[in-house]
Image (cartoon, coloured by chain):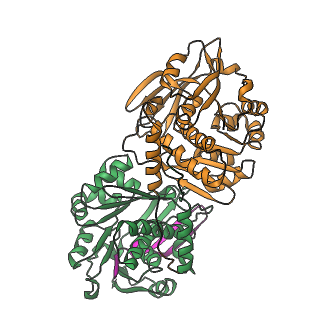
Chain colours: A green, B orange
């Protein structure tokens, strides 16, 4: 089952208490595909400037990623500079330079229009809508967004929500979008506005998957060392979508399994700077971590007490 | 298996965005026993002033609680007054009046000294140590503490830790005690200082149980309405300990089950003001909620991918 991601291919400069990077490979589509390709081939659509080190990206990223849908435009690549707090719980954006992303008009190569699993990374909801218009008959569409679009492009975002199957956001975004601080009511609000399912990521507390009947929780992995939270949410999305594409399924059991693989990829992402958490990870490592994840919550109940 | 709790029997005045109470029945031993007694008989040791409405407490609390170890002293009962923030995420202590608790010297009635499951509620660690000296041969001792004792009585607290099997604290307390903001390293630190197990409660994010080999997570219940977080941690402890006392076990499987029953009781506690969340709850309700809890995290994995 073909898997397509549309999102940013960027250069990140990141300051954490443990070190810093300048112009490191990053962006939502990069984290998504680097994680997802461990499970299933991924096709990327995005844009970079002439300055982007595509050969480096192609060498570092695992096989199974088709970068041919990444447009090379005149101008500078998208750059993001951010600084994390001492406990990595919050971050501050120091600089955002859109570069070639400012005029990006996503055009899907003909071969990608039959994609069955589609992830719309966090870009302008009007562009996300334009991507959807070009996809013929997707089996599952998931999208991300952020406070910037919730505040500035809410009508477009609401139109988008009516057309996606899964919204994947963090808890702050869910609260801001719904105007409700209770995360479960916020989730219900989202489910009343289009998507059949919502995934709410809660950083070091894990993530939850809600549909109209049920909630499923996956914790975060108990890591004693977290180096860089950048990209964890996109890596989560990559693991989630790639597992479903691999399984060729959108049923409830596979969605729960996909949450485990999403959380697994998130845990690899935060364990190193940038995309380096995925260097030398094999499918067998992924599977071991996924099983360890499941063990974190498994319990057999005894006979009913009453 | 006999279950003993030593802790406060107090009068709480609580302000939340949803209402307020004045001099409501509260205190760690009250929440613990009201929750625990749904699963197993509880004996309470504590102290109240002549002003405490014991007949009201005995009428409201479920059967199966032996209050005869609660001393009636001259003076006023322990009173706590607190105010919660709009989102119930933080609270401010407005007033603490120790009253008869200031001179409390716990003396265990002879019949309670053979208790097999003992919970030391959040009181001065020197008093917690004095209780332990009076217990003959407990099978499992768990204790709580708080920032006030971590800051003011750390040497006594460290001596206590060497003598308990399980420390039950919230994440802020674990961080403060260990001096480490990473919750998993904080847990490891605690495990190096005495207890074989640590339970770290994370409020709306659930709780985790760590031993030297494994971590187990239980989420919080997806409640769309939370009215009053007061006592949730003590109710958790009550469900946890009472399940173990009922099962007559301290093995790993039952400890995981006990976490589910602890979380179940915590979810009842926050759903109403004060101890009213336990009014008219039956063992069958507890069991239904516990099973629903387990469903929140259950997933069957497919064949290994590699």
**Residue under the image location 38 percent in, 73 percent down:** A241
When the figure is inspected, residue B46 is found, relative to residue A193, above or below; the finding is: above
Q: Position of residue A12 (x, y in %)?
A: 47, 71
The residue stretch that appears in magenta: A1-28
Q: Which residue is at the front of the view, A297 or B11?
A: A297
**Residue under the image location 50 percent in, 35 percent down:** B91
Q: Position of residue B252 (x, y in %)?
A: 64, 54
Q: Which residue is at the front of the view, B89 or B49?
A: B49
Name the side, left or right, on which B181 lies relative to A37.
Answer: right
When the figure is inspected, residue B162 is found, relative to residue A299, above or below; the finding is: above
Asked if residue B182 shows in the view, the reply is no
Confirm whether the magenta stretch covers residue A117.
no
Q: Main secondary structure of the magenta part?
A: strand
Q: Position of residue B113 (x, y in %)?
A: 74, 30
Q: Which residue is at the front of the view, B63 or B205?
A: B63
Residue A50 sits in quarter: bottom left
Residue B253 sits in quarter: bottom right
Q: Position of residue A145 (x, y in %)?
A: 34, 63
Confirm whether the magenta stretch covers residue A4.
yes
Number of numbered tags placed on the structure image: 0
Asked if residue A93 shows in the view, the reply is yes
When the figure is inspected, residue B30 is found, relative to residue A56, above or below; the finding is: above
**Residue under the image location 67 percent in, 60 percent down:** B213
| Placement of the N terminus of chain A among the 4 image quadrants | bottom left
Q: Which residue is at the front of the view, B117 or B175?
A: B117
When the figure is inspected, residue B90 is found, relative to residue B191, above or below; the finding is: above
Residue A143 sits in quarter: bottom left
């Amino acid at each position: 089952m073909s898997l397509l991601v549309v999102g940013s291919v960027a250069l990140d400069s990141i300051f954490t208490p443990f070190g810093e990077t300048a112009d490191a490979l990053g962006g939502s589509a990069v984290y998504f595909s680097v994680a997802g390709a461990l499970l299933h081939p991924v096709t990327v659509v995005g844009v970079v400037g002439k300055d982007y080190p595509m050969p480096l990206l192609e060498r570092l990223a695992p096989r199974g990623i088709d970068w041919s849908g990444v447009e090379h435009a005149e101008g500078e690549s998208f750059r993001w500079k951010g600084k994390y707090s001492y406990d990595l719980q919050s971050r501050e954006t120091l600089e955002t330079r859109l570069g070639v992303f400012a005029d990006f008009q996503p055009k899907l190569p003909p071969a990608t229009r039959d994609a069955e699993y589609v992830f719309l990374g966090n870009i302008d909801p009007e562009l996300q809508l334009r991507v959807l218009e070009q996809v013929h008959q997707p089996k599952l569409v998931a999208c991300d967004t952020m406070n910037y679009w919730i505040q500035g492009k809410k009508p477009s975002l609401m139109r988008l929500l009516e057309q996606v199957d899964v919204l994947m956001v963090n808890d702050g975004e869910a609260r801001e979008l719904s105007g409700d601080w209770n995360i479960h009511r916020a989730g219900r609000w989202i489910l009343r506005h289009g998507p059949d399912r919502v995934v709410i990521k809660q950083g070091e507390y894990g993530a939850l998957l809600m549909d109209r009947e049920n909630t499923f929780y996956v914790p975060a992995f108990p890591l004693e060392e977290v180096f860089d939270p950048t990209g964890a949410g996109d890596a989560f999305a990559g693991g989630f979508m790639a597992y479903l594409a691999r399984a060729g399924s959108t049923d409830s059991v596979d969605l729960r399994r996909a949450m485990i693989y999403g959380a697994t990829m998130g845990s690899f992402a935060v364990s190193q700077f940038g995309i380096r958490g995925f260097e030398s990870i094999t499918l067998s490592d992924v599977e071991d971590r996924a099983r360890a994840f499941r063990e974190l919550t498994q319990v057999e109940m005894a006979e009913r007490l009453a």
